[in-house]
Image (cartoon, helix red, strand yellow):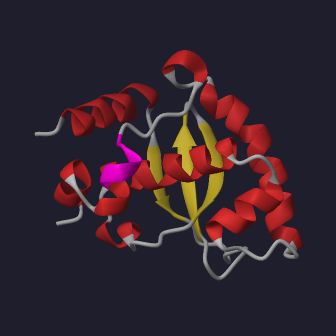
Amino acid sequence: MYPEIIDIQNFIATKGIIIYLGKGAPIDKNLTPVILKINNNTFTIHVLDEYEDLNYYNPILNFIIVFRALVTISESEDFLVWCKQAGLDPDNHKLLDYYKDICYVINDINNCFPNNKIDYFVSDLDFQLNAGVMQFLRR
C-alpha cells in the first residue's frame, strides 16, 4: 500500500472528515459542488473534476480532489488568476462570491492541518500524469 493512502486514511479518521457530492446547482458548468465535513464544520467546495475522479466514489480520491481544489485557490494570486488557471468565466458573479467566501474558509481549514497548511498528500506530478498512488486509486 502507498504511504500517501495510509496518511490520508489516518487524517480522515482523526479529523472525522466526510466528503460527498452536493445536491445544489453548480455555480459554473465546469465545477461540481462537493460537501466537506471536517471538525464538525460543513462547507460546500466547488471542484474542477477534469479527470472525473468523483465518479469512482472513493473517499481517498475525493479527499485529494477537494483539498487539491482548496490548495489551488489558496495559492492563486487573486480571483482572476484562479479563473484563468481553472478555465472559468471571471464575469460570473457567483464565482466571485464563492472565491471570496472560500478564501475566508480556507483559513479555518488550514488550522486542521499540521503546520497550518492544507495538504492533500499526493504530488501534482502523480496527479497529472496518473502515476503512482493516483494510478492505483483510479483503477
Please report the residue visible at 67 percent of the width from the left and 75 percent of the height from the top. 26
Viewer-nearest residue: 104 or 89: 89
Quadrant of the snapshot with the C terminus: bottom left
Residue reaching furthest bottom? 29
Q: Quadrant of the N terminus?
A: top left
Residue 138 appearing in the image: yes
Judged left or right of residue 127, residue 83 is right
Is 27 left, or right, of 92 in this rendering? left
How many callouts does the rendering have? 0
> What residue appears at the point 81 percent right and 50 percent down from the top-left corner?
78
State the predominant SS element of the stretch in magenta. helix
Q: Is residue 95 above or below residue 125?
A: below
Residue 14: name its quadrant: top left
Give the image location of residue 63, x and y in percent: 42, 48
Numbered range of the magenta stretch: 122-126
Quadrant hosting residue 88: bottom right
Residue 12 vs 116, above or below: the answer is below
Residue 59 visible to an observer of this rendering = no
The correct choice, above or below, for 50 with respect to 121 in the image is below
Of the pair 131 and 107, the residue shown nearer to us = 131
Q: Is residue 23 magenta?
A: no
Residue 118 position in % (x across, y down): 54, 33
